[in-house]
Image (cartoon, rainbow, N blue to C red):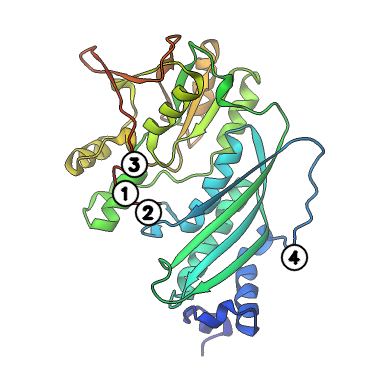
Amino acid sequence: MQTATESFLDQQIVLDHGTGARLSRELVEFMVGVLGDVYVGEMEDSAMLPVPAGNIAMTTDSFVVDPPFFGNGDIGKIAVCGTVNDLAVVGAEPRYLTLAMILETGFPIRLLHRALVSLRETALEAGVKIVAGDTKVVGPGEADGIFLNTTGIGVFHRPPKRMTDVRPGDKIVLSGPIGNHTVHLLSVREGLGFEKNVLSDCAPLNGLIESVDKAVPDDAVHSMRDVTRGGLSAVLHEYSAALGRAVRVEEEALPIDFETRMASDMLGINPINAANEGCLALFVEPGAVDAVLKTLHAHPYGRKAVVIGEVTDRPAKAVEMVGKDGKVSEIEELQGAELPRLC
């Protein structure tokens, strides 16, 4: 005989799950039970949070991953990682998340359970608590199964890190390979077979960032950015525009796994434009590079960290690539998306 929980898992989302009546209450109680002690909401209309006096960091993001479940991640994991990483790169300690979801009628509750379990495990790893949430249910065809939104709050224990703190001569360090997340999701979506050897890099990076902060002085890493949509190219163009300085990278230094490069060549995409979900770009004082690399290499999410280039003193909004033959070419900023939406 099925237990009540097993019976609930076999159900699908219906419109009445979003009415605010008994079915809504039962769905919320189910979700709270799955999230366990990472959810500390008191069912009030607002969360009342103990935060220290001073500046806080706040960010928000929506997640519409296609497919929502994949190797080394899913929409639940990405919802935590994306928001936690955005807080951590500006120098804040991530503390709290809100969780809002839009569920399409017919979405299997068993898959919702799977996403929530992943979300809980990632929140535990990142050390964040979910303090408030909301659920809306829409009709068939009005959403892509499940959409999530998270808003994050972090606190500062040191001065914030800003793009404008970057200086000419700063070295650009990547914490790991680029392109894996995009290649994996495209391969799963299109049945190309690369997904067996190329997994998404989805990961919460606040622990990695904290280890660097402890290993080097506060002013050694001038700025950081998680390399997500738009890829490395978008990050470099953003910094070049903010600084009014040309940024130069070495083609041979770019960390691209062999399988990812092979798949990218076949698909006709450039890994430098590909989305990532666990890659960090750091702009580092030259004298601190060795210490930063040593710290990154000691962490599971930074074992393949490398220096890829530097910020020049040339006043120009340009991103340049030094090719294998020594020739310098400019990396054009994409006007829109090179690929269909992945996340």
The amino acid type, in three-letter code, at marker 3 is Gly
Give whichever of discs 2 and 1 has the lower sequence position.
2
Horizontal side of 319 relative to 214 (left or right) equals: left
In this rendering, the answer to whether 51 lies above or below 173 is below
In front: label 4 or label 1? 4
Report if the CB atoms under discs 4 and 3 are less than 8 Å apart: no
> What is the distance, in whole Å, between disc 1 and disc 3 at their CAs?
21 Å
Give whichever of discs 4 and 2 has the lower sequence position.
4
In front: label 1 or label 3? 3
Indicate the secondary structure of the residue bearing disc 2: loop
The amino acid type, in three-letter code, at marker 4 is Asp
Indicate the secondary structure of the residue bearing disc 4: loop
Residue 184 numbered mark, or none:
1
Indicate the secondary structure of the residue bearing disc 3: loop
Give whichever of discs 4 and 1 has the lower sequence position.
4
Report if the CB atoms under discs 1 and 3 are less than 8 Å apart: no
> What is the distance, in whole Å, between disc 4 and disc 1 at their CAs?
40 Å
In this rendering, the answer to whether 321 lies above or below 92 is above
